[in-house]
Amino acid sequence: MLLVALLVSFLAFAGHASAATWYFLRYVPKSGQKFTSFSGDMVIPPLPKAGVYYLWPGLQPTDNTGVYQNVLDGRSGTWWIGSGWCCSNPNLPWGSGFNTYANEKVTFNNKLDSSGSTWTSTLTRQSTGQKVTDSFPLASKSFNQAIFAIELTSVNWDFGPLAFSNVVITSTGTDSSWCNTKPENYNGATVYSITGLSASVSGNTVTCRMDSVTLQRPA
């Protein structure tokens, strides 16, 4: 089923009722497998003006009740990035974050702990070393969708490419075909490129590495 129909987006967290315009890539593993980590570097694009720009990597669970995200938010006119679970079931406070600026890199690292009870998100602003870490009790969620998203309301894609580098996604299981297969490109709406793709399996863990993932422009 389409994420745009089921995703409880950061838009709802922000209290906006207007429909968003979506551009996203999505990876889905085989049934029974779930994601256990998602990390990489986001290159911060220019912010043309204050507006409802939400740019994010994130994970969505099998029950489609929400999304666990690292959201780059342009509403104030200065980029701010923070992590959180949107938006209910469970109701959790949004995590901490910081301002960031065009051409900076922010490292995001989301990982399920060894007990399987808590997800921890760490964001690092590479230019200054500023770092924030937040934990989210999401043991009840089995994440089976890894997403690179652009979510826009009453604004256009006018900030140029959204680029990610050094991306690493891990899942349970031994089937790595989800990594080696092209991601879903919602409605064919995005021109994108992926470089340096590799998959490996060790024990019951699949590791998917991508040197770069770039959402280049609308199709």
Image (tube, rainbow, N blue to C red):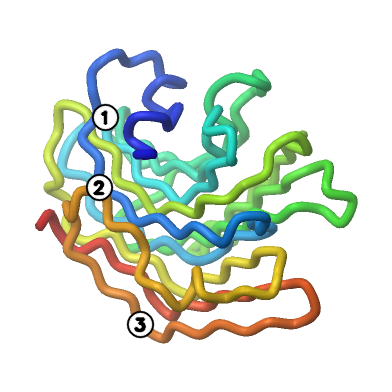
Q: Nearer the viewer, mark 1 or mark 2?
A: 2
> What crowding class fits label 3: few (fewer than 14 Cα within 10 Å), some (14-19), or many (20 or more)?
few
Residue 93, image x and y in percent? 64, 23
Cα–Cα gap, marks 3 and 1: 29 Å
Label 1 secondary element: strand
> What crowding class fits label 1: few (fewer than 14 Cα within 10 Å), some (14-19), or many (20 or more)?
many
Residue drawn where x is 73% and y is 72% of the image = 205
Q: Which residue lies furthest to the front in this view?
A: 31
Q: Of callouts 3 and 2, which one flags the residue occurring earlier in the amino acid sequence?
A: 2
Residue 123 relative to residue 27: left or right: right
Identify the amino acid type marked 1.
Val
Label 3 secondary element: strand
* Residue denoted by label 2: 23
Q: Of callouts 3 and 1, which one flags the residue occurring earlier in the amino acid sequence?
A: 1
Identify the amino acid type marked 2.
Tyr
- Quarter of the figure with residue 114: bottom right
Residue 164 relative to residue 70: left or right: left
Residue drawn where x is 56% and y is 71% of the image = 168
* Residue denoted by label 3: 195
Q: Do the residues labelled 3 and 2 touch (CB within 8 Å)?
A: no
Residue drawn where x is 26% and y is 29% of the image = 52
* Residue denoted by label 1: 52
Cα–Cα gap, marks 3 and 2: 19 Å
Identify the amino acid type marked 3.
Thr
- Quarter of the figure with residue 151: top left
Cα–Cα gap, marks 1 and 2: 14 Å
Residue 30, image x and y in percent? 57, 61
Q: Residue furthest right?
A: 115
Question: Which sits in the foreground, 131 or 135?
Answer: 135
The N terminus appears in which quarter of the rendering? Answer: top left
> What crowding class fits label 2: few (fewer than 14 Cα within 10 Å), some (14-19), or many (20 or more)?
many
Q: In this view, does 204 lie above or below 68?
A: below
